[in-house]
Amino acid sequence: MNSIEEIAKVLRTLKSAVIFTHMRPDGDTLGSALGLGRALSMLGIRTEIVNEAKIPERYYFLEGAKEIKTTPSADAEAYILVDVSAENRLGELQETFRRGARKKLTVNIDHHISNARFCRYNYVAECASNCQNIYRLITALGVKIDKQISEALLTGLITDSGSFSHGDVGRETFLTAAACMEAGAEIGKISYEAYKKKTRARADLFAETISRIRYFLGGKLAIVVVTQSLLKKYGLGQDATEGIVDFALDIDAVAVSICIMEVKRGQYKVSFRSKETNVNEIARVFGGGGHVLASGCMIFGEEEEVLDRLAFTVSQYIET
């Protein structure tokens, strides 16, 4: 793995770069991209940010979020990936990255334990939020963070740490947050806009979905299923499900919480959360990965079959 100083030195030589974010973008990948993009622009490096799909509107309060493109609009010297643990996490942009990777400088800044280190330059340091790594990089670049950068980074810190409640939150997480606040970021505003704010439709979706929690393994495993028909009922997209998986984990007897979201018939995106169990290992059984206490994967099959497979696999990792 490369050092953050090595990567900063390489980035300072660039004239242009494209920053890639992961599919179904969250506050951490967007905060990482917007913060780094702003810093590179301040160094005179032409930068644009891409994601395979439209950015969720709840992140529109971040400056630059509405300008994120679905594909690179111009050639660039480097492709930079932020909060992306594997190429397939790029979704529809995976082939774009692969084609460009053959002749471009590629850089990977991430915090997932499952990261495959697939770029020419890789900095992977496990922590509560990848925005911690981006803060280190911006500091190494010699850029002083302004309000725009600080708001982007604090958004990632808040959302990926569960409002600073997850077990991987440490001293550096709070120091980074403090630095962002000193630069002008408003923690109350960001917490509400990115983490708490819900439309009436999204609140109704949460209420109905949570009322359907199913328990397995003596109550130690909780699974929530979000179907396409349910999303259509409330006129919502897949991004509206963010946060549902965390609710069941607050139940005292639950050791592992899973949210299964139907992507299309026979295909499900699975999100894992746990209090102590290594769900990264569970996700890897199905070709996924992530963090020790928060991971994800994709599973194919009929709904009840998928539930059975998940319950059986989780039973191999927790005592019942």
Image (spheres, helix red, strand yellow):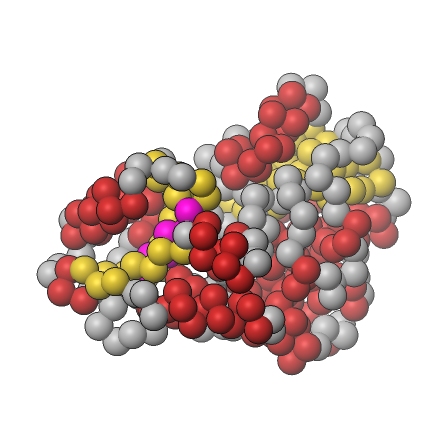
Is residue 229 shown left or right of residue 7? left
Q: Decide which of 314, 311 is in the foreground and name it.
A: 311
Relative to 41, is 139 above or below?
below
Q: Decide which of 104, 89 is in the foreground and name it.
A: 89
Relative to 293, is 12 above or below?
above
- Can residue 80 be seen here? The reply is yes
Identify the residue at image location x=60%, y=25%: 95
Residue 181 drawn in magenta: no
Identify the residue at image location x=33%, y=45%: 283
Identify the residue at image location x=84%, y=48%: 41
Where is residue 79? Give x, y as percent: 69, 34
* Residue located farthest toward the right when viewing the structure as drawn: 44
Q: Residue 247 is drawn in which quadrant?
A: bottom left
Residue stretch in magenta: 257-262
Is residue 291 shown left or right of residue 189? left
Total numbered labels placed on residues in the image = 0
Identify the residue at image location x=39%, y=65%: 209
Where is residue 271? Give x, y as percent: 39, 52
Where is residue 120? Give x, y as percent: 60, 29
Is residue 97 shown left or right of residue 113? right
